[in-house]
Amino acid sequence: MWETIIVSPFTNALLMIYKLIGGNFGIAIILFTILIRLITHPLMVSQIKGSSKMQEMQSSKEWQDIQKKYKGDKEKLAQEQMKFYKEIGYNPLSSCLPSIIQIPIIFGLYQSIMRALAASPMQLLTLTRTVYPFFHIADIVPLNSKFLWMNLSQPERIYMFGVGIPLLALIVAITTYVQSKVTIPATANPNAQGAMMSKMMVLYMPLLLGYFALTFASGLSVYFIIGNLLGIAQYALVGKVNWAALLPGKKPAQALSARKK
Amino acid sequence: MKKYIVFIGLLLGLAMILGGCATGMMASSWPGVTADANNAYIAGGPYVYAVNLQTGAQVWRFPEKASVANPFFATPVLTSDGQLIVGGFDKKLYSLNPLTGQSTWQFTDARDRWIGGALVADGMIYAPNADYKLYALNLQGKLQWSFEADQAIWGTPISDGTNIYFGTLGRRVYAVNAQTGKQAWVQKVDGAVLGLPALGADHTLYVGSYGGTVYAMNTADGGTRWSAAASSWIWSGPVLDGSELYFGDAKGSFYAHPLTSTGQPWNQQLNGAIVGSPLVSADSIVVGTEAGNVYFMDRTGQNLHSVTVSGKVYATPVAAGSLVLVAPTDGDAILVALDQNGTIKWSFIPPK
């Protein structure tokens, strides 16, 4: 099921792009990432709008009152929150569902990149069984896995004086940090649950994706970097990029007011 | 605090899932086997094992501490001075003592995995690596020369004493001078060449390609003497026995191709993809399939008997005295010893 719906079509789409552009797998990953982002753009917009609405709602007086009033009764608090959502016409799934839908896409894309690169015998055997009949496997294998200075099937290092510097992992971590920082909505209440989670995202996601880039095939790093840049562009398109958040010393609330001016 | 723990737990979970995917894929090949009079040596995942041929019991395993991300699958090879040469996915080529499993030297210059087994000939080790290079070492592990090809080299090379011959994933076959490492010739074929070539006494080199063609090439210049099409891709190289060439393809067709005008060609349809080369002995031709069957055929293609083992038989069967060693993938055992009647004598399941 997973194979038929996600991995196999993704792998074949990647190979199709690879063939069309004349055999550059790095460019194929970039174009495929753009394609996926375009397809999922409506979901992303829905998520951005949902998050903004959530932030506005959590800043409202009514919401704060409900929190205070039912502080000691979690069940009643949940009921009242749901009631409040209904009253203002907010669907709590609208901010998280698009993100959840993107998780299988990330996994699928990762598996497809690794499969298409076929860096080991079993991967090549699996790739042979994955490609659709209109591809002639002997014409595809081997994929040109060299892109710029990288071998896309291997973790990337630039060797200087005998020391391997993971440049791509650093770029992944930096772009992830920037994306998290400028796209997380500023909030008037930094102690709110959402704001706390956002802080953790800003801190841990660059570390996590940087670790992936350090450890796994550099083809995945290319996907992460392009995905991060496109993510910022998507937020910019709907006017939700908070560049002020990158300025040192700006607290989220200050950044919010700076943006409002 | 609870929320932090849940969040970090989720991130770790994501890391483990992605890590699991990656590790699983990185460790994806099938075992390589060789044997001497006493032991079988199997590069079978996280360890290289020595297994007693009489009892099927483990004699030793290497390394002491395994790494799942850096397994061993390249076929080990024995040298005349008592070394066992085996490469790992950790980019290192090891010389082990076949009696103890202790490492005597390591070659660490390669930049990629060791997928194909090395060739030992004329006091030299010719080791192919996925970093596109063929490394020539002396028996002390010192690099003599290296040759960079167009693409990764997954198959074991072969030598006629003058040149070393090997294929690459880049659809090319190379001849490289054994002494100097200089290219003698290179020829393009219709698909990746993943297996060990075969050499004929008449200076003909036989290779199978992923394009589904067997080529007979002149060892002097690489010119094609003839070619024959199979019904699907060919992974492992053909095996030459006298005046017959034997090979199998991905659709399970097994072919005997006579090299003389008097011979009769035949082919047999087996029940799964044939990935390994056949084992050709005086008594029989032994072929393994992806469906887990091991066929014993006579020289006319008649099935003498067959046996089903747990797992997929991708690796080439290996002769060890009167035994036939089969190394299944994804089965219960990683090594199964059969007698000439196809009876399982013992199975080796690695201890935890």
Image: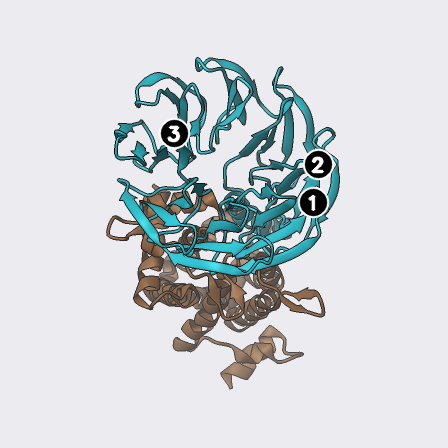
Mark 3 = which residue?
Answer: B289
Q: Tell me what residue is drawn at x 53 percent, y 34 percent.
A: B31
As helix, strand or loop, the secondary structure at mark 3 comes to: loop
What is the C-alpha distance between the residues marked 1 and 3?
35 Å
In which chain is the residue bearing label 1?
Answer: B
Task: Please tell me if label 2 and label 1 are on a single chain.
Answer: yes
What is the C-alpha distance between the residues marked 2 and 1?
8 Å
Q: Is residue B253 visible?
A: no
What is the C-alpha distance between the residues marked 2 and 3?
35 Å
Q: Chain B is which colour?
A: cyan
Q: Residues within 10 Å of mark 3 (few under 14, many from 20)?
A: many
In which chain is the residue bearing label 2?
Answer: B
Numbered badge on residue A97: none
Mark nearer the N terminus (1 vs 3): 1
As helix, strand or loop, the secondary structure at mark 1 comes to: loop
Q: Residues within 10 Å of mark 2 (few under 14, many from 20)?
A: few
Image quarter hosting the N terminus of chain A: top left
Q: Residues within 10 Å of mark 1 (few under 14, many from 20)?
A: some
B336 sits to left or right of B237: right
Q: Tell me what residue is drawn at x 37 percent, y 49 percent.
A: B217
Closer to us: B239 or B53: B239
Disc 2 vs disc 1: Cβ atoms closer than 8 Å? Answer: yes
- Amino acid under label 2? Asp
Q: Which chain is brown?
A: A
Numbered badge on residue B81: 2
